[in-house]
Amino acid sequence: MQERLQKILAQAGYGSRRACEEYIITGRVSVNGKAAVLGQKADPAVDTITLDGKALAKREALVYIALYKPRNVLSAAEGQDDRKTVRDLIPAEGHLYPVGRLDFDSEGLILMTNDGELTNKLTHPRYGHEKEYRVLLARRPDSEQLAAWRRGVVLTDGDRTQPAFVNFLSTSGKGAWIRVVMGEGKKRQIREVGKLLGLPVVRIIRTRIGTLKLGDLKPREWRHLTGDEVNALMGKSVPAKERKPRPKPTVRRK
């Protein structure tokens, strides 16, 4: 059966649909020896589809892994320099891509998977999946600063951030921990908002992506998701009596 190429690539584990669209736009994908175009359809059972000259791999079993990304690690499947990537932290074969990228100097929950459909659902702006963070500020915020953060702030590029849930958690020396929950994720958004409000950000820890929580994972630890967790991310409800306990981390902190 014919399907759009970006969907075929995503289902084969090559990333989200948007990432696979970029492969097509940049001329990396061919169908039966001819460069593919965006919007083109093909049938993987009949047509020869290649990416960078290599035939698509057979569809892998779907894998879902929760990882605690430490600071100073790239949220990427492949490195462009000598810096370590999140993929380097998981000694498993096959394609795995990060969902919900974090800045190099931020830390916390990353979902690693080869499920392009789920990746698209969790990252596409129209779905507005919440992401939750614990943020350490160098200064203690006042009520006006927190209120401005909640309403939305005009960034240096002219874009205004969407309303967010922001609340004070605790003091920390001269600074403070706050909780930030938002449905968008512009590049370095939390750090820029903090800077514009006069609240320099010292540390960012992502604790939740949609329904998936970081839990008790420590930096560099990872674990496979349960079926219940995968279903919840996909929006499928699971009866309470059928839910299974979350597994312990597969890899301990080094």
Image (cartoon, rainbow, N blue to C red):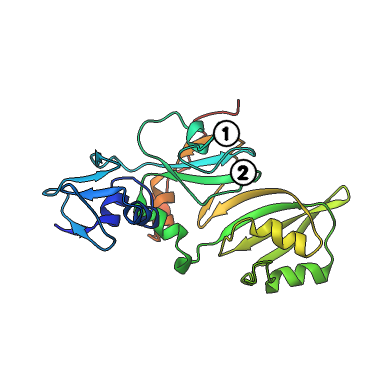
Q: Residues within 10 Å of mark 2 (few under 14, many from 20)?
A: some
Q: Distance between the residues labelled 2 and 1?
A: 10 Å
Q: Earlier in the sequence, mark 2 or mark 1?
A: 1
Is residue 247 something one can see in this rendering?
no
| Residue wearing tag 2 | 104
Measuring 57% from the left and 53% from the top, which residue is drawn there? 208
Residue 89 coordinates in the image, percent (x, y): 51, 32
The front one of 106 and 84 is: 84
- Identify the amino acid type marked 1: Arg
The amino acid at mark 2 is Phe
Measuring from the top left, give residue 180's x and y in whole percent: 67, 60
Q: Secondary structure under badge 2?
A: loop
Question: What's the mark number on residue 83?
Answer: 1
The location of residue 77, given as percent across then percent down, is 45, 40
Residue ranking furthest to the bottom? 151
- Direction from residue 152 to residue 172 in the image, left or right: right
In this rendering, position of residue 245 left or right of residue 28: right
Q: How many marks?
A: 2
Extreme residue toward the top, this view:
254
Q: In screen coordinates, is 61 left or right of 42?
A: right
Q: Is residue 8 above or below residue 163?
A: above
87 versus 192 height, above or below: above
Q: Residue 120 carries which label?
A: none
Which of 141/87 is in front? 87
User: In the figure, 197 relative to 171: above or below?
Assistant: below
Whether pointer 2 and pointer 1 mark residues with C-beta atoms closer than 8 Å, the reply is yes
Seen in the image, is 24 located left or right of residue 188? Answer: left
